[in-house]
Image (tube, grey):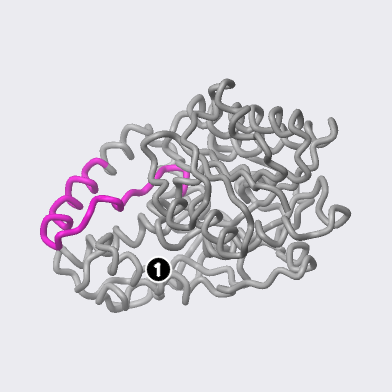
Amino acid sequence: MGMILVNGAGGFLGSTVVETLCRRGFPVRATDLSGTDLAPARRAEAEVIEADLLDPASLPRLFDGVSQVVNVAGLFNYSLPYEVLHRANVVLTRRMAEAALAGKVSRFIHISSIAVYGKPVTVPMKEDHPLNAANNYERSKKEGEEVIFNFVRKGLPAVVLRPAGIYGPRSCYGQAAFMALLALVRHAGVRRIPVMRGGPKMQHVHVQDVASAVAAVLAAPEEMVQGRAFNVGDDTPLGQGELFGAIMPELDLEELFRYPWSTRLYWPFIRVLLALPESAFGRFNDWLKAKWESVIAGHGLNSNLAPRLDQDFLGYMNADYALDNSALKALGFQLAYPDARSGLAETVRWYQREGWLPHF
């Protein structure tokens, strides 16, 4: 197999993809912006090239000798304006697809997201579920996919992966922000907290399983993957209370009592929060970040994590976001973390070892 180009290699998912492919003996060229953390890629003995993918002059060098591409680069952040997300998740994707088509690569794997589905119509969601993207992040990921499938019609041998919410070592967003929020509560002297019972369930996936899915698609016969999309999720949709229950013991938190989820009672309140101006959530997250500084100082942590709550995330409290992952498994793919509860607890311990979260 020829050289595999992995972009976004300085990020959470990209660095894990690089490590996984190198460990399995694939030749890898890792790229990201200057100033990003490419140390994991260098330790994995990948070839490293710093480059701005939006600069057309940087692409010929990156694609020289490349036979496969893993397009990880993009932005995952619900608080960013659409214009920023569009540039990272759509324009950049188009540049990569153009260069890949011109370079006659044999496989192009595009990392999308289950966010393209929007609110579920049927559960579990299969790959042919309608794409009802609503918020800015969802729209940008859907439009990125549209770019890829347009290039498939032009002859690009592309495959799309749609991961569920990714968690694991090096993540600074998503479940990582909730871990920091719980750590902030414990730092404030609270030991026992109420935990939700029931409520909407969401599917997740460990970062290592996403990287393994990339490897599985790279190794799969063309007729099994060409022009297709694949869901990437674990086997166990969980409610928020179940997720917190996996994290709490690692942070010395205990359950005070359980309160039942009620759509009739809680959803009207959530709708009020969704109607607030974005600036209100910005101020709240600034306040959380300021409080987190005392945790950093008190426990000698680095500043990679911070608690936050993004407004659009609340919109996912309106349904079960569960996936059908059977298409990917038909390729021979096996999950290392079929239940997020074990992976989340392991991830908290990793953060504590690395000084991202405190020990209590």
Disc 1 marks which amino acid?
A: Thr
Q: Position of residue 347 (x, y in %)?
A: 40, 68
Give the secondary structure at mark 1: helix
Query: Residue at left 71%, top 47%?
Result: 160
Q: Position of residue 315 (x, y in %)?
A: 51, 47
What stretch of residues is rendered in magenta? 286-313
- Up the image or down, 304 lies above or below 73; here it is below
Position of 138 with respect to 269 (left or right) is right
- Up the image or down, 137 lies above or below 196; here it is above
Numbered marks: total:
1
Q: Is residue 202 visible?
A: no
Q: Position of residue 220 (x, y in %)?
A: 79, 60
- Up the image or down, 360 lies above or below 180; here it is below
Pointer 1 residue: 347
Query: Residue at left 54%, top 25%?
Result: 54
**Residue 311 among magenta residues:** yes
Residue nearest the viewer, comparing 32 with 135: 32
Query: Residue at left 47%, top 77%?
Result: 342
Look at the magenta stretch and give its main secondary structure.
helix
Residue nearest the viewer, comparing 60 with 123: 60
Q: Position of residue 48 (x, y in %)?
A: 49, 43
Residue nearest the viewer, comparing 337 with 174: 337
- Up the image or down, 179 lies above or below 174; here it is below
Residue nearest the viewer, comparing 196 with 168: 168
Q: Is residue 312 visible?
A: yes
Few, some or many residues within 10 Å of mark 1 (<14, 14–19, 20+): many
Res 102 → quadrant: top right
